[in-house]
Image (tube, rainbow, N blue to C red):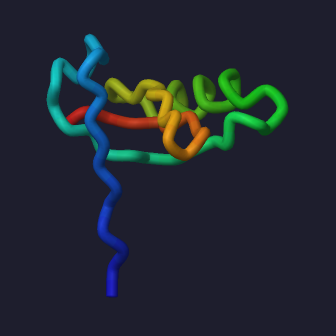
């Protein structure tokens, strides 16, 4: 069985503009250099990938809006 892709929505994100976004990867905030790592992953993913903050799970999420 294929895993269901995780979706998120960040109402204040200008890039997503209130659309849902596909979570491409996550980086725990407690990890050293977490934000630069998430930014790097977003740059590598390309095609509008960017970073959201998920405070409920203390993670940075690399996402692409749908």
| Residue located at (33% from left, 24% from top) | 48
- Where is residue 24 shown, x and y percent of the image? 44, 47
- Where is residue 45 shown, x and y percent of the image? 46, 36
Q: Nearer the viewer, residue 47 or 37?
A: 37
Number of dots carrying numbers: 0
Q: Quadrant of the N terminus?
A: bottom left
Q: Residue furthest right?
A: 32
Say if 15 sits above or below 9 in the image: above
Q: Residue furthest bottom?
A: 1
- Where is residue 33 shown, x and y percent of the image? 79, 26
| Residue located at (63% from left, 42% from top) | 27
**Residue 26 falls in image quadrant:** top right
Q: Nearer the viewer, residue 53 or 3?
A: 53
| Residue located at (52% from left, 34% from top) | 55
| Residue located at (30% from left, 17% from top) | 13
Q: Residue furthest front?
A: 56
- Where is residue 10 shown, x and y percent of the image? 30, 28
Q: Nearer the viewer, residue 24 or 20?
A: 20
Say if 5 sits above or below 28 in the image: below
Q: Quadrant of the C terminus?
A: top left
Q: Is residue 37 left or right of residue 20?
A: right
């Amino acid at each position: 069985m294929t895993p269901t892709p995780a979706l998120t929505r960040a109402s204040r994100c200008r890039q997503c503009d209130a659309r849902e976004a596909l979570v491409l990867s996550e980086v725990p905030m407690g990890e050293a250099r977490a934000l630069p790592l998430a930014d790097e992953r977003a740059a590598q993913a390309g095609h509008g990938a960017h970073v959201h903050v998920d405070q409920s799970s203390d993670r940075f999420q690399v996402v692409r809006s749908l």
